[in-house]
Image (tube, coloured by chain):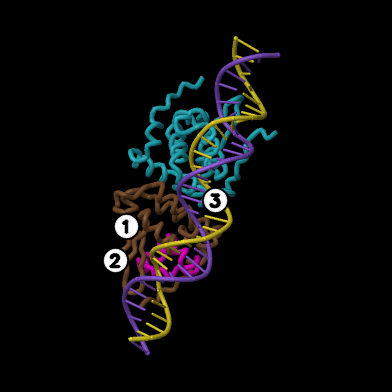
Chain colours: A cyan, B brown, C yellow, D purple
Amino acid sequence: MSRTPHHPTREQIELPMVLDCLSDPIRLAIVYQLAQQERVSSELRCGDFNGLSGKSNLAYHFAKLRDCGLMQTRIAGTNRFMRLRREDMEARFPGLLDAVLSSAAKDADRLPLLAECELVEVDRK
Amino acid sequence: MSRTPHHPTREQIELPMVLDCLSDPIRLAIVYQLAQQERVSSELRCGDFNGLSGKSNLAYHFAKLRDCGLMQTRIAGTNRFMRLRREDMEARFPGLLDAVLSSAAKDADRLPLLAECELVEVDRK
DNA sequence: TCCTATGTTCAATGTTTATTGAACTATCGA
DNA sequence: TCGATAGTTCAATAAACATTGAACATAGGA
């Protein structure tokens, strides 16, 4: 009957787990896409990532991203909204997330999954 | 009859492989220790890492670190000298290595393998 | 030349990982 | 209440990974 999935506290976030999470192309794309949309809306629905892989495989990666503390899931009706835990990451590992994100941006042409992230339209009502 | 082990060119270095390499505690400790010693001597012998694991296991991790482009191996007699490929990393992913290293330093107390790195005496003749 | 020290390579093992489809849960709207 | 939608969970599978010890290669010193 758990209303909200488990999230580690800020202090529980571990460096190796974070790096391991970011080393997977699909998870890197999820994080990248969340960061791209951040200036518009800080949240995205699970379904916004369906282009990256099948639903059950995405649920698996979402769980890993939650477990390592990179993102947070909020349940709203039948939707799950995800957002990056930017402040927590910055507090624990200053500059790390930005360094990874800008590295990914720089290599976007080599990371095919990142290409799809550019054109996520935001007509959330 | 290969005199020197294989190393990727700067352009061949891939972000996911680098992050995956750094996500392993033993490999992170190797990179960390190399970075620590950098101001003194830019190189360390393989044997300087024997405290981290067994020799064959270390050879396995060394190979991964070479393959991902994080370090370079130079053969000198019966020794192998390793050094970080700092310039290449900085050129490909600016700020990334430093962000990871300072994150690791910040969490040194939680990364037991990093502790041993502090006391590597440098009496290379 | 032989012995030793330094590392690598190989094979074997057990663990973790990513991926898939099917079954399931829960919520919203008609 | 019924059906559709959004996601999760579970079981199965194949691939990748880390670890170990034994065998091997190479160079240096007695």
Spatial CA span between label 2 and label 1? 16 Å
Please tell me whether mark 3 or mark 1 is closer to you in this view.
Answer: 1
On screen, residue D27 above or below B9: below
User: Is disc 3 on the same chain as disc 2?
Assistant: no
Q: Position of residue B13 (x, y in %)?
A: 34, 50
Q: Which residue is mark 2?
A: B1
Please tell me whether mark 2 or mark 1 is closer to you in this view.
Answer: 2
The chain to which mark 1 is attached is: B
Q: Position of residue B60 (x, y in %)?
A: 44, 61
Q: Secondary structure at mark 1?
A: loop
Spatial CA span between label 2 and label 3? 42 Å
Q: Is residue A74 left or right of residue B87?
A: right
Task: Identify the magenta region.
Answer: B31-58
User: Is disc 1 on the same chain as disc 3?
Assistant: no
Q: Secondary structure at mark 2?
A: loop
Q: Secondary structure at mark 3?
A: loop
Residue under the image location 47 percent in, 40 percent down: A27
Q: Residues within 10 Å of mark 3 (few under 14, many from 20)?
A: many
Q: Which residue is mark 3?
A: A14
* Nearest to the observer: residue B99 or residue C7: C7
Q: Is residue B43 magenta?
A: yes
Q: Position of residue B90 (x, y in %)?
A: 33, 52
Q: Amino acid at mark 1?
A: His
Q: Amino acid at mark 3?
A: Glu
The chain to which mark 3 is attached is: A
Q: Position of residue A46 (x, y in %)?
A: 52, 30
Q: Is residue B85 left or right of residue B119?
A: left
Q: Which residue is mark 1?
A: B7
Q: Is residue A98 magenta?
A: no
Please tell me whether mark 2 or mark 3 is closer to you in this view.
Answer: 2
